[in-house]
Amino acid sequence: MSQLAQYIAEKRQQKPILSMTHVVYGYPTVKDSLDWMATLLEAGADFIEVQFPFSDPVADGPTIVAACHGALHDQQLSVEQCLKDIGQLGRDFPQARIALMSYLNPMYRYGLEKLVKRCAEENILGLILPDLPYEQAGDLRTYCDANGIDPVWLVTPVTPKDRLAFLASEARGFLYCVARSGVTGNSNHNGGPQQSLDEYLAEINEHSNAPIGVGFGIREKAHVDALKGKADVAIIGSALLDAYNKGGKEEGLKLFNSLFN
Amino acid sequence: MQSNNGYYGEFGGSYIPEILYSSQQQILHAFEEAKNDPAFIAELKDTWQNYSGRPTPLTFCKNLTDHFGGAQIYLKREDLNQSGAHKMNNVIGQALLVKRMGKKRVIAETGAGQHGVATALIAARLGLECTIYMGAKDVKRQYPNVFWMKQLGATVVPVAEGAQTLRDALDEALRDWSSSHEDSHYLIGTTCGCAPFPEMVAFFQSVIGEEVKEQSMAQFGQYPDRLYACVGGGSNACGLFLPFLEEKQVEMVGVEAGGKGLELGQHSIRLSNGLGQKGIAQGFATMFLQDENGQLQETHSIAAGLDYVGVSPIIAHLAQEGRIQMTYAMDDEVVAACALLLKKEGIIPALESSHALAGAFKDAPNLPKESRIVINLSGRGDKDIFNVAKAMNDATFPEFLEDYLADYNTDNQGEA
């Protein structure tokens, strides 16, 4: 069984839903971002989703885009240093897990095989690359299988039924279910008609043996509560970053506690 | 050029967020059906002819030929298209496809504004809602095009993220498409992006090379010896080159923007001098200008239409194979080439197209007198009046602008 799935299953014995909090590495500085991650872990976050910034984050909305560009503005960020830093964080907080999220290009330049090996060494068990679809990920899947790392596939409310069933059946650590159309954060654009979240999650649960994480648009306690019994992990990104931007760690922590504690 | 499942050698592919999977598949199937449907092709040709003025001429340049004393120089006159550039060929094709798919809205990215204007024109004609993403810096630099887009009924969204240029506009267009895909089509302006966009745009642009084949046979009884095109995203180059791909004796030269120099940030040279590296971003694999950490970098060219950070996967592949020879022209060489065409042939070229001229003018004197070269004059230069006036140090132009502004303000106050 996947190490990540096992971790989630064990933790779920005690909690109705787990928390995955998203932090942009290097924003506003490397030290600040690592401090913020540590604060969240001390407060009881079950996962940190660490985003390694890319210049062209096409699946992200304004809040995260601005943070990525801010992080890249006047410093060079290296993938190797990021892996070391978040590996250390994982060792400091052994009760939690770290997942790495980025776009393909910085990871491709670093080397996908090396990346997966290093993730295994640093105990970073999940890898989220939103611009690498399953079909194009043959090499990455091979490396991941060999190293006990889980590539995390995304499904969306507009993923065709047969494809959704296939991706769900391929999920290992957890399946990332995008709750709505659009990019991360508060979208300005109107999504089209969507089946209700409950129906969508029920259909995923039918096909998935792996735990289910839900992200995109989670901002309030009611959103998190609505997922209990239907999903395993609630993923908060832009809302947390908005709070952090508004009032630093204190404001961010207030939001985290209101959602999960 | 037929792709291998979306790939051209090691370039191309489809690297898009999962949310776009269904829309991408829909375009893939719609395009496959449409290009094999005689009714679609007939409507396409009719619109090209009766709306955009095709076929465009192949013009022999006697004065330039005499001036250089080498190859006989011909221009393919894409500047004479409706909208003043080859961009029209593609927007007509994709907009007809949008109608076929039953979508009501188009989204496009634009750098200089040429593709934005072309998209706004066809959207107005076909009754489509139209949103154009444009870097905030480009909105400032290219306001006349923004003005026309608005008058044509398009919504122009200035993108204030990142470098505020074409690359950021493309990112933002993709983000819009991620939430609007059910009723909107992303009408990409060049042979880039995820499959099938490179193949589809190349298909619609190939009318350029197909016409050159017929026209060269009619005018001088054989195909040209060499072809020249500027390479930004690569659509006009694909359009001219691809129909000649199997004609092994026809040589092809792509000219990139050398800008102000070869340091990163000063140019847009992705395919020569080892300046670009393979990467995967904005939906596809190609040669990008990037740093060692894989972050895409800023670019420069005097021609806003050439300063893109990536390049068509088709051109990247053909350059790697050696089928296309790549070179570049610097900003000052480009302005000189533009000036020479004005004086010798009475044609006003776009600064983008002037890169192709500059590349060809370097070779022309050294080519045999009986050889014939065709340069793709991809667009006309009226839009560049401000930049060219500045580059040529025209003394009267600032005075004109000041007087115009004074009059403009006085007239408007009078009306108020």
Image: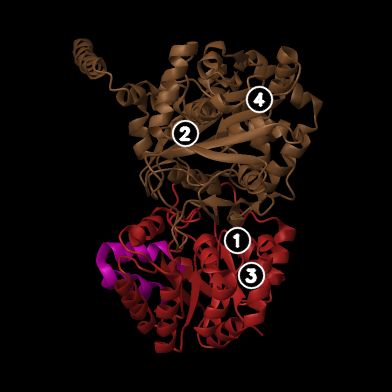
Chain colours: A red, B brown
In front of the other: A67 or A13 = A67
Is most of the magenta stretch helix, strand or loop? helix
- Which residue in the structure is indicated by mark 2? B305
Give how far across and how far down residue B232 sits, in percent: 52, 38
Q: Could you tell me which residue is drawn at 48 percent across and 34 percent down?
A: B131
- Mark 3 chain: A
Q: Is residue A233 visible?
A: yes
In front of the other: A146 or A153 = A146
Asked if A98 appears above or below B343 in the picture, the reply is below
Give the structural element (helix, strand or loop) at label 1: loop
Give the structural element (helix, strand or loop) at label 3: helix
- Which residue in the structure is indicated by mark 1? A132
Amino acid tagged 3: Leu
Give how far across and how far down residue A230 sits, in percent: 59, 72
> Which region is colored magenta?
A236-260
Please check the rendered image and state whether residue B188 is part of the magenta-colored stretch, yes or no: no
Asked if B312 appears above or below B88 in the picture, the reply is below
Give how far across and how far down residue B259 sits, in percent: 40, 38
- Which residue in the structure is indicated by mark 4? B208
Q: Nearer the viewer, mark 4 or mark 3?
A: 4
- Which residue in the structure is indicated by mark 3? A140
